[in-house]
Image: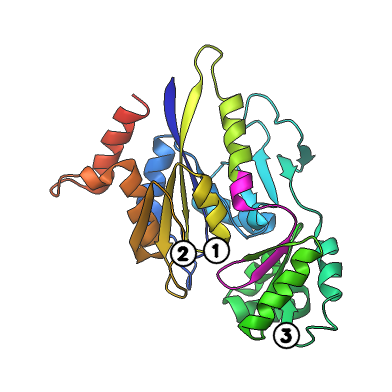
C-alpha cells in the first residue's frame, strides 16, 4: 500500500494573509509540494469565480471546494474516471451539497421584519459595500459576489441578537457558519463533509488496480467554519488569527501555530511533513524535499 498526502486548506487568514490576501511567504513550500505531487486543495468560503483567478496565481490544477463546502469542483480529466453523482459545469465535474443562492436570499428576506437594520447581505451591500467590508479591489469584490450556493451576512446587532438570528435561520433549514468576517448562510453542508467526499474520490480513483493508495490528510484553518474540516482530517493545523480568539477544538494530532496567515500555514504544514526533525544547519525546503521523496514517493 502506498501512502500519499493530501493537504486541505482554508484561504483567507490561513494560506492568504487576513489583511493583504498575500501568500508570498508560502510560495517556496507550495512549489515544493507541487514538485513532489502533493495536492494542495483550497477549501474556502470563496466563490468559483474567485477561485478561477486565484488558482492561476497559485499555479494550481487541483480540485477545490467553494462556499464553505457547498460544492466541490474537480477538473475534467483529473481522475481517470468521472466521479459519480456529479454534473458537468464548464470544464469541471461538480458535486453540489446545497440549494442555490436564491433560496437563501428568500429565507433572509423573511427575517427583515424581526431583525430590521441588524444585518446586511452581500446583495444588499452591493459591490461598494463589499469592498468597504473586505478591502478587496473592485474586480475582486465583483468575483466575490458571484455566489452560487450561499449568501454572506454582515451582522450589525448585538451578540445575543445574533444568536437568535442564527437560531431562526437554522430552524428554517439553513446552515449558518461563522467565517472571519461574515456569517455564511447555506445548505446542510460544511467543509468537513466536502473533505470526506473528495477524500473518497481520491481513494476510489487513484489506485492502479493492484495496489490501493492510502492518503494522509492534513487540514489547515483559522476560523469557526474550518472546525468540521479540521476534525475529520488526520492532522489539524490551527493557524493563529490576528483578529479573533483561538479555535476551541480537540484533536489527537493538533498543531497550533505561533505565526499568523501564510507564515503560520508554512509553520504548521511543515511540522506535519516532518520539519520538526530538521537539523538547524539544514535549509527547511531542502530538508523537506529529501524527506518527502523518501517517505512518500520513494
Q: Report, in whole angstroms, how far the alpha carbon at label 2 lies from the one at label 1.
A: 7 Å
Q: Report, in whole angstroms, how far the alpha carbon at label 3 lies from the one at label 1.
A: 21 Å
As drawn, 55 above or below 248 = above
- Magenta residue check for 231: no
SS for tag 3? loop
The answer to which quarter of the image holds residue 104 is bottom right
**What label does residue 247 carry, if any?**
2
Tag 3 residue: 118
Q: Give the range drawn in magenta.
A: 178-194
Q: In this view, does 279 lie to the left or right of 219?
A: left
Dot 2: within a 10 Å radius of its alpha carbon, few (fewer than 14), some, or many (20 or more) residues?
some
Specify the farthest residue to the bottom.
117
User: Which image quarter is the N terminus in?
Assistant: top left
Answer with mark 2 or mark 1, whichever residue precedes in sequence: 1
Answer with mark 3 or mark 1, whichever residue precedes in sequence: 3
Q: In this view, does 237 lie to the left or right of 164?
A: left
Dot 3: within a 10 Å radius of its alpha carbon, few (fewer than 14), some, or many (20 or more) residues?
some
Q: Which residue is drawn at 34% across and 45% down?
A: 272
SS for tag 1? helix
Q: Where is residue 167 in the image (x, y as percent from the top left)?
A: 72, 70
In this view of the protein, which residue sits in the foreground, 95 or 136?
A: 95
Tag 1 residue: 224
Q: In this view, does 297 lie to the left or right of 211?
A: left
Q: Residue at x 70, y 48 (%)?
A: 71
SS for tag 2? loop
Pointer 2 and pointer 1: residues touching (CB < 8 Å)? yes
Amino acid at each position: 500500500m502506498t501512502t500519499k498526502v493530501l493537504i486541505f486548506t482554508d484561504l483567507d487568514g490561513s494560506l492568504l494573509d487576513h489583511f493583504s490576501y498575500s501568500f508570498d511567504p508560502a510560495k517556496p513550500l507550495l512549489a515544493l509540494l507541487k514538485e513532489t505531487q502533493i495536492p494542495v486543495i483550497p477549501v474556502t468560503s470563496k466563490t468559483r469565480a474567485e477561485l478561477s483567478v486565484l488558482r492561476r496565481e497559485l499555479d494550481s490544477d487541483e480540485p477545490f471546494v467553494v462556499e464553505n463546502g457547498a460544492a466541490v469542483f474537480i477538473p475534467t480529466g483529473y481522475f481517470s474516471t468521472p466521479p459519480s453523482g456529479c454534473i458537468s459545469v464548464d470544464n469541471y465535474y461538480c458535486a453540489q451539497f446545497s440549494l442555490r443562492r436564491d433560496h437563501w436570499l428568500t429565507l433572509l428576506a423573511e427575517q427583515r421584519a424581526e431583525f430590521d437594520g441588524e444585518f446586511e447581505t452581500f446583495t444588499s451591500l452591493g459591490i461598494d459595500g463589499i469592498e468597504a467590508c473586505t478591502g478587496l479591489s473592485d474586480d475582486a469584490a465583483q468575483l466575490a459576489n458571484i455566489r452560487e450556493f450561499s449568501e454572506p451576512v454582515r451582522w450589525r446587532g448585538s451578540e445575543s441578537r445574533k444568536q437568535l438570528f442564527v437560531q431562526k435561520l437554522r430552524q428554517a433549514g439553513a446552515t449558518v457558519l461563522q467565517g472571519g468576517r461574515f456569517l455564511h448562510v447555506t445548505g446542510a453542508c460544511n467543509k468537513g463533509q466536502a473533505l470526506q467526499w473528495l477524500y473518497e474520490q481520491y481513494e476510489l480513483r487513484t489506485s492502479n488496480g493492484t495496489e490501493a493508495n492510502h492518503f494522509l490528510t492534513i487540514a489547515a484553518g483559522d476560523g469557526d467554519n474550518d472546525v468540521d474540516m479540521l476534525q475529520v482530517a488526520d492532522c489539524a493545523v490551527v493557524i493563529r488569527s490576528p483578529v479573533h480568539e483561538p479555535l476551541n477544538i480537540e484533536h489527537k494530532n493538533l498543531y497550533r501555530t505561533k505565526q499568523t496567515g501564510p507564515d503560520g500555514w508554512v509553520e504548521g504544514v511543515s511540522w506535519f511533513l516532518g520539519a520538526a526533525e530538521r537539523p538547524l544547519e539544514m535549509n527547511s525546503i531542502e530538508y523537506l524535499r529529501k524527506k518527502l521523496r523518501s517517505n512518500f514517493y520513494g
